[in-house]
């Protein structure tokens, strides 16, 4: 993000995100990612989807019933470490309660921020920041009740048709993704667009849906590569390194990528691609 002009609003930026960012465990119906949080951030993911279970002030990470061997403090520490190393970046985080129904996580979230991060890390406004204002900040997209901690998740223009009952419904899911991406370039430029390419159902687990949708998404974006368009946040399960780079390139097309962060990023993605191809042999 170092090359994005400071005066450009976040709503005008196209960026990769992950659905159920921390869901690495629990079997085929719970797992949505294979990379750790640190690896996702280094690869270029800038939107995180984080779900917390609230019990007696504790915030553990869950995907449904599946505990993800982490708590909210681990997520905050990961974001803090990343932004300290790369202060030109920003991270957006949807935060919601899952597998508990207290409807009262605000106090616990604030306690965790003070314990595992720091108050000034946050963007304290409902307004969409510019890139310059957002650098080095965690922007919480608040999907829970309570005083403002950042922007409200519901203020985004969102397409999240996640119910895919069977693999026979993949075309319906793709049409939802396609229509929202087509609407994004001409949509309200002051509003962040968020499109979920992820989905699941009783007869279609997340990885199976990703195998059906992600290649279509890649081809769609590839066909748009020479067009100067805004697509907003594209949120995925199991995104591969080439997909992430494709999305990032929408704002880097006119920039000569010779600075150190860009070289480090390219090296990291190459390493991930080598690992992926080695694992599929």
Image (cartoon, rainbow, N blue to C red):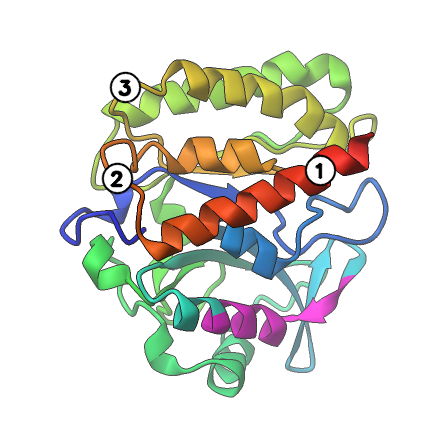
Local crowd at mark 1 within 10 Å, few (<14), some, or many (≥20)?
A: few
**Number of numbered discs on residues:** 3
In this view of the protein, which residue sits in the foreground, 86 or 111? Answer: 86
Q: Are marks 3 and 1 in contact (CB under 8 Å)?
A: no
Which segment is the magenta one? 68-81
- How far apart marks 3 and 1 lie (CA) works out to 29 Å
Q: Distance of mark 2 from mark 3, alpha carbons?
A: 18 Å
- Residue bearing mark 3: 227
Mark 2 or mark 1: name the one nearer the start of the chain: 2
- Is residue 226 one of those drawn in magenta? no
Expressed as whole percent of the image width and height from the top left, the position of residue 42 reads: 51, 55
Q: Are marks 2 and 1 in contact (CB under 8 Å)?
A: no
User: Along the horizontal axis of the image, is 275 left or right of 255?
Assistant: right
On screen, residue 10 above or below 125: above
Query: Residue at 41% of width from left, 13% of height from top?
Result: 223
Seen from the viewer's position, the closer of residues 7 and 241 is 241
SS type, badge 2: loop
| Residue matched to label 2 | 256
If you read the primary sequence from the N terminus, does the residue marked by circle 2 or circle 3 appear first?
Answer: 3
Give residue 101's position: percent from left, percent from top: 66, 63
Q: Position of residue 103 (x, y in %)?
A: 58, 66
First in sequence: mark 3 vs mark 1: 3
In this rendering, position of residue 240 left or right of residue 250:
right
- Residue wearing tag 1: 276
């Amino acid at each position: 993000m170092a090359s994005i002009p400071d005066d450009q609003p976040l709503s005008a930026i196209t960026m990769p995100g992950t659905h159920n960012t921390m869901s690495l465990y629990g079997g085929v119906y719970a797992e949505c990612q294979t990379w750790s949080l640190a690896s996702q951030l280094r690869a270029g993911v800038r939107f995180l989807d984080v779900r917390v279970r609230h019990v007696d002030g504790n915030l553990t990470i869950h995907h449904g019933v599946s505990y993800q061997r982490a708590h909210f403090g681990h997520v905050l520490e990961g974001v803090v470490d990343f932004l300290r190393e790369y202060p030109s970046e920003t991270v957006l985080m949807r935060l919601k309660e899952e597998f508990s129904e207290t409807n009262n996580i605000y106090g616990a979230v604030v306690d965790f921020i003070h314990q595992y991060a720091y108050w000034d890390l946050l963007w304290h406004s409902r307004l969409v920041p510019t890139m310059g204002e957002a650098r080095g900040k965690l922007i919480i997209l608040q999907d829970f009740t309570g005083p403002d901690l950042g922007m409200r998740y519901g203020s985004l223009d969102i397409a999240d048709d996640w119910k895919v009952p069977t693999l026979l419904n993949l075309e319906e899911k793709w049409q939802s993704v396609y229509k929202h991406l087509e609407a994004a370039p001409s949509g309200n430029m002051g509003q962040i667009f968020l499109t979920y390419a992820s989905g699941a159902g009783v007869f279609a687990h997340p990885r199976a849906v990703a195998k059906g949708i992600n290649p279509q998404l890649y081809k769609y974006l590839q066909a748009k590569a020479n067009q100067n368009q805004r697509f907003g946040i594209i949120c995925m399960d199991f995104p591969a390194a080439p997909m992430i780079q494709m999305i990032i390139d929408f704002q880097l097309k006119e920039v000569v990528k010779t600075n150190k962060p860009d070289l480090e990023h390219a090296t990291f993605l190459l390493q991930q691609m080598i690992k992926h191809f080695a694992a599929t042999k």
